[in-house]
Amino acid sequence: MADRKTVATALKKASCYYWLKKGYSCHEELGLLSRGVLKGDIVCVNLKAYFVVCETKSCVSDYTTDKKWKQYLDYCNKFYFVFTLETFEKLKDRLKTDLKDTGAGVMVLHPSTGWLVVKVNAKERNVAGAIRKTLLTRMAWRAGISKRTSRCYRVFIKETE
């Protein structure tokens, strides 16, 4: 398998392409709280101010050491973990209990197609008005990517021997 940084970059790209195709503007490493205390790997918004946060996990240890992912839930209408197929297969049983009653979803990068596949749909939640306003302001300030500024590509992770 490729190194963690390469996998994480590929998962972020795949996440952006997935949401770009659905008409969202995507922002990488967007601070949800001031001073970068809480950063979403990918934060997406559409024209109706509907927020999606994707947290990419490059390996099992990346997932198991993340203790603050539940804090992201207040900042989005939907929350997804994004895994490689290999990582998802290793975590599948644990995710059933970890994600129970959280409403978090799971997306997996398909190794042969290069597209993300939703394995567990995220449940919709409301975002408070003050949080919505703050996020929109941060996103406008950072100028994310959208269908108008970026093309969608399939993403593959090269195996190393």
Image (cartoon, grey):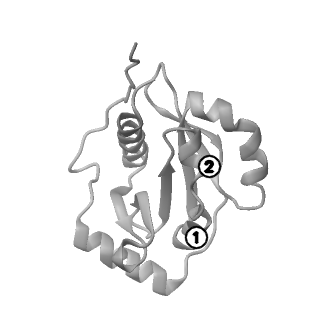
Q: Amino acid at mark 2?
A: Thr
Q: Is residue 65 above or below residue 8?
A: below
Q: Residues within 10 Å of mark 1 (few under 14, many from 20)?
A: few
Secondary structure of residue under mark 2: helix
**1 and 2 marks in contact (CB < 8 Å):** no
Q: The C terminus is located in which quarter?
A: top left
Q: Decide if residue 4 is on the left or right side of residue 82.
A: left
Say which residue label 2 marks: 64
Q: Tell me which residue sits at (45%, 31%) in the image.
A: 115
Give the numbered dot on residue 71.
1
Q: Amino acid at mark 1?
A: Gln
**Residue 127 numbered tag:** none
Q: Position of residue 26 (x, y in %)?
A: 35, 56
- Depth order, front residue of 14/152: 14
At a point 47% along the width and 81% down the height, the residue shown is 131
Q: Residues within 10 Å of mark 2 (few under 14, many from 20)?
A: few
Please say if 137 is above or below 151. below
Is 77 in front, or is 89? Answer: 89
Which quadrant would residue 150 be assigned to in this image? top left
Q: Which residue occupies 51% across, 27% down?
A: 110
Q: Residue furthest bottom?
A: 130
Gap between marks 1 and 2, in whole Å? 15 Å
Residue 149 point in image, percent of width and height: 20, 50
